[in-house]
Each structure stands twice: as structure tokens, then as C-alpha cells.
Amino acid sequence: MSANAGFSCNTDRSGGSDPQLVQGIRVYGAFANKAIDARLTAESTLTRIVEASTDKADRFTRAYIRGAQDYILALKDGRFGGPNAARVIDVLSRRTDLTDRELYKYIVPSGLSADGNVNAQSLRKVVLFFKEDGLISDPAIEVDAVLDRSFVDRALKSPGR
């Protein structure tokens, strides 16, 4: 899925919903005008770094974990209201398309793990959804076969992370 894509859930008369992939959009505007209801983000940054250098990937992973820990300190009761909120909102408003700092008090932040691990159970659900929708055509693709935790394991053992 591209960075400019999301999902629209068109509710039918029975109250069910039929998720539809919507591509070629400006994500925040699409949320605002209700063109999409959800977005799944595919991460390719680490893959590109790994291809360039294992040392760079290790440094990226350590920095990611430090960033995740700062981000988590910004949260309180599922919102940006923790002790680190102002700092994180400042960074996000400067480094993402969401520049209006006031909007951050209304959004539900993404969940992250303080130790850098991904939620494998959640990934399995996403892969299943993509398979059912035909976006992944190879039935042999499984999360556990491709999930590589070696960078996180090294970062967690690294002194001064």
C-alpha cells in the first residue's frame, strides 16, 4: 500500500461494512472529509537502511527505541497528555503533514512498544486481511517466517542505548 492510501468502510443496510482500499489521496485531508476511515502504514525505511548497512540499521534501531520511549512518555489515558507530550507534539508538528498542534489533542496516537518489538499478533491479522482482500496473493507468506527481531535484540543489549 502506498503512503497515500487508506480504507473506506461503506456501511450497508444490514449495518455491516465493506472495507475498500482508496489510493492516491492526501491522507489527513481524506480523514477530515471522511473519504477514508482508517489507514495502515507499511514501513519500508528500515528495509532500505538494512540494505545499505547493518551498522546503520543497528544505529537506526537504537534511535527508534529511544524515540518510541519518548513517544510513550507523551501518552496518558490513550491521548497526548503525558509529561513528554509538548516535546513530542512539537517534533510531530514539524516533521509530519499534521502541523496544527491543536489537532493532536483530538487524535488517538498509535501504539508503540517501548522495547522496539512489533506486535506480531496484530501483524498476523493485517496479513490475513490482505490475503482475504487479494492484496497478498501468496498463501505461503506468514509473519513469523519474515519477522526478524535480530536488530531489536542487538539494540536492547547495546550499552548506552
Image: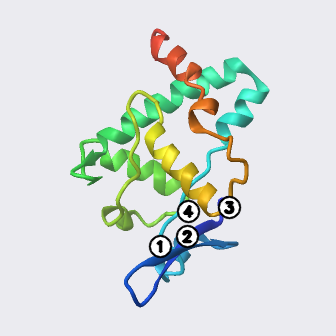
Mark 1 vs 3: CB contact within 8 A = no
Mark 2 vs 1: CB contact within 8 A = yes
**Outermost residue, right direction?**
52
Which residue corresponds to mark 3? 134
Query: Residue 144 appears in which quarter of the rendering?
Result: top right
Which residue corresponds to mark 4? 97
Mark 2 vs 4: CB contact within 8 A = no
Q: Mark 2 to mark 1: distance in Å? A: 6 Å
Q: Nearer the viewer, residue 82 or 121?
A: 121
Determine the secondary structure under disc 1.
Answer: loop
Q: Mark 2 to mark 4: distance in Å? A: 19 Å
Which dot marks residue 37? 1
Q: Mark 1 to mark 3: distance in Å? A: 20 Å
Q: Please give the name of the residue rendered at 46% of the width and 29% of the height, measured from the top-left corner.
A: 65
* Label 3, residues with CA under 10 Å away: few <14, some 14-19, many ≥20: few
Which residue corresponds to mark 2? 7
